Every structure is written in C-alpha cells, then in structure tokens.
Image: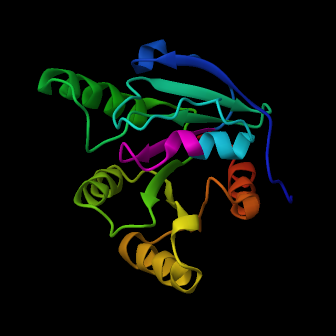
Amino acid sequence: MNTKFMNAKFIISAEKLSQCPTFNLPEFPLLGRSNVGKSSFINALANHKKLAKTSNTPGKTRLINFFNFSNNFIIADLPGYGYAKVSKEAQNRWQKYLEEYLLKREEISSLIQLIDGRHEIQKNDYQMREWVKVYKLPIITIVTKMDYVPKNKILNVIKNVEKSFGGLVLPFSAVDSRYNAEIFDFLLDNNSTK
C-alpha cells in the first residue's frame, strides 16, 4: 500500500491506564526523548500541522494522547523521557503510570521508539530499550529528523541504530513524506492486537 498520509483525529488524553478507553484497534505507543519529534511524527503522517501540539519546550506532553488514524490503528503519544521541568514526585508518578500502561494495555500491537538521527544514541534511549527488553515487549525503531542528516550519511545512521538496537529500523522526516509509505506498511501489517 503506497500511502503518504492518512486522515487522523485526536480522541482523548489519559493520565493512567484506568482512564484509557477501549478502541478495539491496534495501538502503537511512541517512546522517545522529549525533543525527538513525537508530535511532528504524528502531524506528518496525518498531513496536519496542528493535530498534535508541538513545542520548543521539551517535556510539554504530560498525558497519554490518543490519535485515531482512519479507524485502522491508534497512535499513543507518551510523555518524553530525559527532560522535564517538574518535581521528582511528579516524574515518579508519570513513570509508574506509564509502566502500568505499557505492561498491561492489551491493545498495544508494538511499541515505537523514536531516535534523533542527528545525534549519537543517548544514554536514556539505551535505558528505555533495556527496560523494553526485560519485559520482552515488541518494538521497532524510527530514526527521526533525517532531513538534517547529509544524504551520504543516512545509510550509516540507520546501520548504526540497527547494530545498537536490532530489529526493524525505519527512517523518518517530518518535512519529507517519502519515508511515510514504509511506516504505514508496518502499521497496517501489524494491526492485530494481542
């Protein structure tokens, strides 16, 4: 299926698992550092610049935000890790709620970890991946901001992430839709819940 964009709409925000509605659709939570471009990822796939709120201030997403893509699947935008100007107590609460959601949410088909293609993989990216491995959760990696990476280095960046994390690694750019079709192929091929 050669899909560049897909209609999407924001459904609801939830703080914790008990507030998450049942959609009966496969769900793909986005994991990533606070400035990796999770909101831009959602907006680019939907071809809608203001669907998910983007911000220059890292740590703005404080809730789990659910987006329905043409009744084919749900993308869940999670609070970013690695930066947030909030108290330790608030961070601990988020962590507890997010762990419960990631481990017990039956609709989750696969996690998607976003990595910034402009930089080396960060320590907290590795820590998140280790946590995912411990619980044997399905996951793929999407390397964002590829429009900032020189063309002759794109393959090296992808190979480096493949070597570090294994599994499926896909490139992505919020300003260049040429990578979208492959991402949609994955999302549509994996649209069965556990």
Is residue 165 within the magenta segment? Answer: no
Which image quadrant for residue 90?
A: top left
Q: How many marks?
A: 0
The residue located at (73%, 40%) in the rendering is 46
73 or 41: nearer the eye?
41
Asked if residue 38 is among those painted magenta in the image, a careful observer would answer yes
Direction top: furthest residue: 19
Which residue is nearer to you in this view: 171 or 108? 171
Res 29 seen here: no
Q: Is residue 126 visible?
A: yes
Residue at 43% x, 20% y: name it. Answer: 17
Q: Is residue 77 left or right of residue 130?
A: right
Q: How far from the left and from the top, in percent, is residue 111?
A: 50, 48
In the picture, which quadrant includes the C terminus? Answer: top right
Residue 148: where, in percent of width, then height? 52, 67
Query: Where residue 55 appears, x then y in whole percent?
Result: 45, 34
Residue 9 versus residue 155 in the image, above or below: above
Check the image and name the residue furthest to the bottom.
Answer: 152
Nearer to the camera, 133 or 47: 47
In the picture shown, does residue 183 fall above or below 108?
Answer: below
- Residue at 43 percent across and 72 percent down: it is 161
Which quarter of the figure has residue 42? top right
Q: Is residue 53 left or right of residue 103?
A: right
Q: Which residues are magenta?
A: 27-40
99 to the left or right of 116 = left
Describe residue 69's horizontal placement relative to residue 67 as left or right: right
Q: Which quadrant of the figure contains the N terminus?
A: bottom right
